[in-house]
Amino acid sequence: MKKLLVFAFFFGTLLANWEEKIDINGYFNFEFEQQIGGDEGTLADEHGSFDADMFNIVFNIRPTDRVRVAADLTWEHGPQTEIEKGNVGSEYAFAEYTVNNSLRVRGGKMFTAFGIYNELHTAKPTTIVVKEPNPTNKIYFLAKNGTVEQTMLYPRWASGVALLGDSYVGNMPFDYIIQMTNGDLDYANQDENQYDKDDNDGKALGGRIRADVTSDLQVGFSFYRDRLNHYKKISGDWEKVANKDVLTFGTQMIWHVTDRFRFEAEYVNGSVDIDASSDKQKFNRWGLQVLPSFLITDKLNLFLQLTAGDPNSNIDKDRVYSYAPGINYELDNNVYIKSDIYTVLSKENNSLLKGKDSSEFRAVLAVGF
């Protein structure tokens, strides 16, 4: 009995210490989408589908006062690995050392710090809208068909090191992050793993700075620069024919105009440059989102998401526009029901949508914990 009491005491002490060092949080998203108008053969869901979209567990572990290990583990679209359904992954996993408030050093797999949404894209309890805007955040990821202008403006994730921190200019607070990473891979080389090994000598460089100009107004600036190997299929085999230079800049603003009226805007502009005799391309591309929202009550938020994008400046009549009026209702603490009517309008020369339009009802149950 004495030994049992001693063991229980030390085990309880150890458990209490670890509880102080580990925070476990997460979120859950469940979605429904149904096309309600427009053309056939679009990206809208013609049949109406439920989606067990996301279940995430977020760990923050602090072995010491200066060291933090963070990981986000995700189960996406109801995964069942033995029949290759859904996806299981690590959104990020990194270690971070705090020198002081103005400087932290991070290493591991991270979200690319760019704009408003990239670090929040799966965490729907933290956003007003049903889904993040395509033109500024991802441009429809359809790279494998060789349509270069439909690839990402910047990679969603990156493996490397970063410097980040919070500071002040006078009385104005700001935060910053600078990342050096392996960068992205060309669509023909996606079997490689850029979180483990780079396929070229160069490293990508990116960063973001955000400043609270006033207590109601935050502005930010982001950039991303990378040089990738570019491949082309020659005689049935993929061969490297050139470098693909990607350069992207972004600006953002979140303005709480009044206690109830909020205005958000983001603009992204980038370029792709492939210089080879067998595959020569150079073009600019841009995306824009404008998002006014208004709190009717403390729990009911009305919003209007407006977007526009031009995936290739060298192609006339290829732009895409969308508008999505919607509601965000906080059913309970950290429990949100969101829905909108998402209408997409495309021009006839768009390489993905080909001038087809669609309207879709979208709804999501988002729970944070």
Image (tube, rainbow, N blue to C red):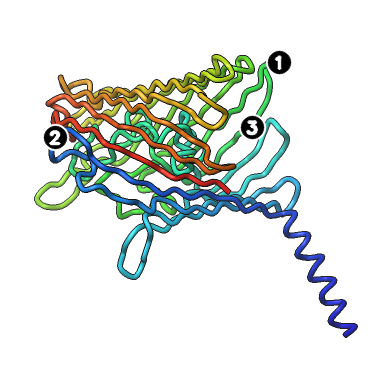
In the rendered image, residue 210, in percent from the top left (x then y), is placed at: 56, 24
Q: Would you place residue 57 above or below residue 39 in this image? A: below
- Label 3 is placed on what type of residue? Gly
First-in-chain label (3 vs 2): 2
Q: Nearer the viewer, residue 193 or 267?
A: 267
Q: Would you place residue 56 above or below residue 259 in this image? A: below
Instruction: Kindly report the distance in space between the C-alpha atoms of the residues bearing marks 3 and 2.
Output: 48 Å
Name which quarter of the figure residue 326 lies in: top left
Instruction: Kindly report the distance in space between the C-alpha atoms of the residues bearing marks 2 and 1.
Output: 53 Å
| Horizontal side of residue 50 vs 95, given as left or right | left
Foreground disc of the pair 3, 2: 2
User: Which structural element holds mark 3?
Assistant: strand
Residue 10 visible in the picture: yes
Q: Would you place residue 321 above or below residue 186 in this image? A: above
Name which quarter of the figure residue 303 lies in: top left
Q: Residue at x 35, y 48 (%)?
A: 199
First-in-chain label (1 vs 3): 3
In the rendered image, residue 325, in percent from the top left (x then y), is placed at: 36, 26
Residue on which the image places disc 3: 165
- Label 2 is placed on what type of residue? Asp
Instruction: Kindly report the distance in space between the C-alpha atoms of the residues bearing marks 1 and 3.
Output: 16 Å
Count the marks: how many? 3
CB within 8 Å, label 2 to label 1: no
Residue on which the image places disc 1: 171
In the rendered image, residue 137, in percent from the top left (x then y), is placed at: 38, 33
Residue on which the image places disc 2: 39
First-in-chain label (2 vs 1): 2
Foreground disc of the pair 2, 1: 2
Q: Nearer the viewer, residue 278 or 112?
A: 112
